[in-house]
Image (cartoon, rainbow, N blue to C red):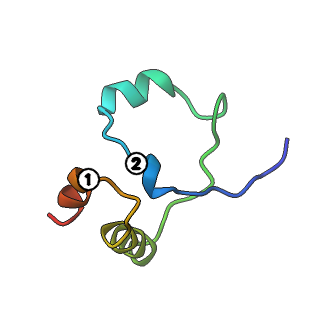
């Protein structure tokens, strides 16, 4: 098992119901492993990047601007 980097692609951002995510990924260690959490600064930088990206869908950009 290798620790691989994680990438976030703006073109693949979708809306998901919390319950759908919990049912698809019920417990850590089976399909994924939590390595840590983003700092507030990192999270804000990602949101700002997506708000300015041409690859993110318009409806999602509107939600990010709220």
Cβ–Cβ under 8 Å for marks 1 and 2: yes
Q: CA distance from mark 1 to mark 2?
A: 8 Å
What residue is shown at x 38% (from left), y 68% (from top)? 53
Residue at disc 1, secondary structure: helix
Characterize the local packing of mark 1: few (<14), some (14-19) or many (20 or more) Cα atoms within 10 angstroms: some
User: Which residue: 32% across, 26% down?
Assistant: 19
Residue 25: % across, % down:
51, 28
1 horizontally vs 62: left or right:
right
Return the residue nearer the eye: 13 or 17.
13
How far from the left and from the top, in percent, is residue 60? Answer: 26, 53
Name the residue beneath numbered marker 1: 60
Query: Could you tell me residue 48's position as x and y percent?
Result: 34, 74
Question: Residue 66's x, y, as percent?
Answer: 14, 63
> Residue 57, relative to residue 45: is it above or below?
above
Q: Residue placed at 59% from the left, 47% from the top?
A: 34
Q: Which mark is residue 13?
A: 2
Is residue 1 left or right of 39 when viewed as pictured?
A: right
Farthest right residue?
1
Which of the marked residues, 1 or 2, is nearer the chain's N terminus? Answer: 2
**Residue placed most toward the observer, 34 or 16:** 16
Q: Quadrant of the N terminus?
A: top right
Q: Residue furthest front?
A: 54
């Amino acid at each position: 098992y290798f620790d691989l980097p994680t990438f976030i692609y703006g073109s693949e951002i979708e809306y998901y119901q919390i319950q759908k995510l919990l049912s698809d990924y019920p417990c850590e260690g089976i399909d994924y492993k939590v390595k840590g959490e983003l700092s507030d600064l990192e999270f804000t930088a990602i949101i700002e990047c997506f708000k300015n990206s041409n690859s993110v869908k318009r409806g999602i950009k509107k939600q990010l601007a709220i």
